[in-house]
């Protein structure tokens, strides 16, 4: 692993698999000390083993982000073991595919759960990490939103609403802390090959009466889904000193699905 002179402390939520895993590993390779959290201990252990085997430094924290007490517990534990969080990646999320339905049939409990994990948990995590970032005049808040934060998601009202909401939160934080060395940005992925997206593709293939493999070729102008490792390099850049002037932005990495903003 490459070592940098400043070994920044990063916290990545939902880092047990998929996009969060790829970002955590890329951060470790960039020399950050990386705290990783999710509910599934076995997946966190796998990621931690991979980071440590390559010479990186990490800690794991099992937590359910639908629990409002979890963000404070996570951030305080990281502070005790590694130091104050300097880079927060709000990546953990619930997809539309867990219970897709037209709005009139939407399940209210699923709406609440989606908002709790996709919006309230990042809000609470930001509240926890910002005081130390402001004191130290350096910080990076990065949220993995979605292109569904810019366009609608058929049968995914809670998902799309939550991702639009998180972009509003990101831009508001960016405004509030811009003069204190702290940036807040979002990455908006299109379809990425993960557990979350596998379920969505299976739902859409059945709905459209087609095969998953066939649907996959038509999901992006690239003719394929993206890989989690294709999201990580932008996260590394946005977390770096070089990105000090970039704030309040929401960058699509979507293979060209949305080209209008
Ligand atoms: P994934 O493979 O399903 O991974 C999601 C991660 O979030 C897992 O580590 C999961 O771990 C964690 N998580 C889920 N619910 C949680 C909870 N209640 N408490 C704590 N951790 C929780 O999904 P992914 O595709 O990598 O998604 C990552 C982010 O990218 C999400 O915010 C998603 O909306 C966004 N995104 C994904 C795509 C895509 O096509 N894949 C596109 C646009 C945006 P546990 O289940 O162990 O808790």
Image (spheres, rainbow, N blue to C red):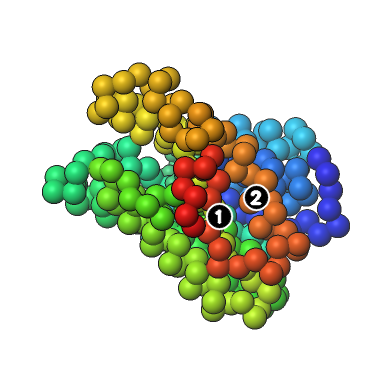
Looking at the image, is 134 positioned above or below residue 30?
Answer: below
- Whether label 2 touches label 1, CB < 8 Å: yes
Q: Report if residue 99 is visible in the image.
A: yes
* Secondary structure state at the residue bearing disc 1: strand
In the image: residue 229, left or right of residue 144: right
Looking at the image, is 20 positioned above or below residue 8?
Answer: above
Q: Residue 184, percent across and down?
A: 57, 66
Which residue is depicted at the point 59% across and 47% down?
Answer: 36
Q: Residue 258, percent across and down?
A: 46, 48
Q: Residue 187, percent across and down?
A: 54, 53
Which of discs 2 and 1 lies nearer the camera? The answer is 1
Q: Which mark is residue 251?
A: 1
Looking at the image, is 206 positioned above or below residue 173?
Answer: above
Q: Earlier in the sequence, mark 2 or mark 1?
A: 2
In the image: residue 168, left or right of residue 97: right
Which residue is depicted at the point 81% across and 40% down?
Answer: 1
Which residue is depicted at the point 50% across and 69% down?
Answer: 171
Q: Which mark is residue 234?
A: 2
Q: Which mark is residue 4?
A: none
Q: Would you identify the image quadrant in which residue 29 lies?
A: top right
Q: Residue 49, percent across and down?
A: 67, 33
Within 10 Å of the Cα at label 1, are there few (<14), some (14-19), or many (20+) other Cα atoms? some
């Amino acid at each position: 692993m490459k070592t940098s002179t400043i070994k920044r402390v990063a916290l990545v939520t939902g880092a047990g698999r998929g996009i969060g895993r790829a970002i955590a590993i890329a951060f470790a390779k960039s020399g950050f000390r990386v705290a990783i959290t999710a509910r599934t201990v076995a997946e966190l252990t796998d990621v931690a083993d991979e980071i440590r085997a390559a010479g990186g430094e990490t800690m794991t924290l099992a937590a359910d982000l639908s629990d409002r007490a979890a963000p404070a517990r996570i951030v305080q534990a990281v502070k005790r073991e590694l130091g104050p969080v300097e880079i927060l990646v709000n990546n953990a999320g619930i997809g539309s595919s867990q219970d897709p339905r037209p709005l009139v049939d939407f399940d209210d409990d699923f709406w609440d759960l989606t908002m709790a994990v996709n919006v309230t948990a990042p809000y609470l995590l930001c509240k926890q990490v910002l005081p130390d970032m402001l004191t130290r005049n350096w910080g990076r808040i990065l949220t993995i939103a979605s292109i569904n934060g810019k366009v609608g998601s058929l049968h995914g009202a809670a998902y799309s609403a939550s991702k639009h909401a998180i972009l509003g939160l990101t831009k508001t934080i960016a405004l509030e802390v811009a003069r204190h060395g702290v940036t807040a940005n979002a990455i908006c992925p299109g379809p990425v090959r993960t557990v979350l997206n596998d379920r969505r593709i299976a739902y859409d293939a059945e709905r459209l009466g087609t095969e998953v493999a066939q649907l996959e070729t038509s999901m992006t102008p690239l003719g394929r889904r993206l890989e989690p490792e294709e999201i990580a390099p932008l996260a590394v850049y946005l977390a770096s000193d070089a990105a000090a002037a970039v704030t309040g932005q929401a960058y699509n990495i979507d293979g060209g699905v949305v080209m209008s903003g």
